Amino acid sequence: MTDSLARELACIDCGTVHPLGYRLECEKCRGLLELRYDLDVLRARGPALLAGGGLWRYAPVLPIADPAHRVTLGEGGTPLLDCPRLSKVLGVRSLAVKFEGANPTGTVKDRSSATGVAAALQFGFTATSVVSSGNAGSSIAAYSARAGLRSLIFAYARASAPKLLHMAATTADLVLYEGVYDDLITHWDRLVESRLFFDCGASRNAYKHEGKKTIGYEIAEQSGWRPPDVVVAPVAVGETFIAAARGFREMRDAGWIPRVPRMVAAQATRANAISRAFRSGRPLEPLKIGYTVAEGLAAGNPGRKGEWVLRLLRDGRGAAGDAEDEQILEAQRTLARTEGIWAGPTGVATLAVLGKMLAAKELDPAQSYCAIVSETGLKTEAAPPSRAATAFDFDSLERLVEQRLARA
Ligand SMILES: [Zn+2]
């Protein structure tokens, strides 16, 4: 069993170093914290350190010390799918999709739920809580159940029926909230201080956040430790984006990969606070937002994580873009038709943004791309195709098969 090489927490603003423990902010300046690892060991041992499959293959670069706390439902190890037909549609040399819909609850959230709930066990908590547009709620509920912890899930009342069903099945305490994520999260973040529950939110907890770093490690390892030129990541408050970027930096600093990919932040136009700030070169301003089909991206006030994303974009020659709901739904259909990958709207926002930025010549089609597709389409709620049905005898069946297949 591999030991965790986590050594300390460091403030991303003032650099103050704190010992490992349940701590959400810097004591000096209230800045966000990031985990730091023993780079000497990472450098000396290289990827040979890794053992086993799935998310916990990367246990040396995750902050969970005791293997008994490493809760799992089989998350991670999702496919990196080369997409030649979609590449042609988008006019790009090479595009791979990192399909996070293959995770146990169908979304990338399972990575952070695994380390978040494991950290709740590590720090002796008996309950977890999260405010969610749907995916995080169902994931935290499932992982908490798996770990034998009580969960209190606050879910967006407009979340899709499959998401609500899944949450109701896995948690005893499901509370629906009105309004969007931003309306509740500020109050909930304050309540975290009471320590009645373990913070499984996206705003501050470095331990929870950390699981998503494995998406960067997997993209690198599945590419033979030569990651693509550009990685497009979805951004609501920025957890996946920041974690993936940190993973790539860590691997570069440890000499596992030659260079870090350029990171592109993808948002829904109806919740585009970060893309708007980046593209205009202005400070981050919270937006009052309404509904977007990309439910998981519906955050108008990404707060300090949003500032962190902007800093990474500005320091790391990144790029940002956003797509309208119609473009997102179009990308969903195109991905399904061209590659057989059925993803939800939140998941394909990256592809919609990539297509838009390529068409606007903001990105170079000669580069290699990886788009993180963060959720399955199986949790989407939409009107099904027409249910008009036909009865057949042998002759009519034969005629139909011949006609249909002759069409191609
Ligand atoms: Zn600080």
Image (spheres, rainbow, N blue to C red):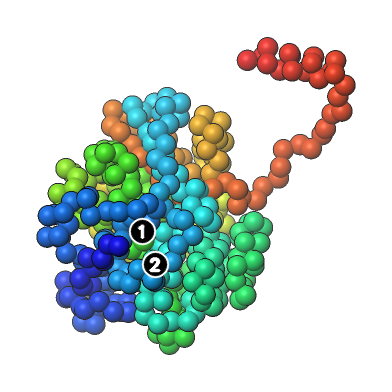
Identified by mark 2, the residue type is: Arg
Left or right position of 63 against 373: left
* x 57%, y 46%: residue: 377
Q: Quadrant of residue 83?
A: top left
Question: What is the quadrant of the N terminus in the image?
Answer: bottom left
* In front of the other: 117 or 35: 117
Q: Residues within 10 Å of mark 2 (few under 14, many from 20)?
A: many
Q: Earlier in the sequence, mark 2 or mark 1?
A: 1
Q: Residue at x 39, y 67 (%)?
A: 70
Image: 187 above or below 373:
below
> Which residue carries the number 2 mark?
70
User: Which residue is the site of mark 1?
Assistant: 56
Q: Is residue 119 above or below residue 399?
A: below
Q: In the figure, is residue 127 to the left or right of 45?
A: right
Query: Can you give x and y, in whole percent of width and height, for residue 313 in the image?
Result: 27, 52
* Callouts 2 and 1 close, C-beta under 8 Å: yes
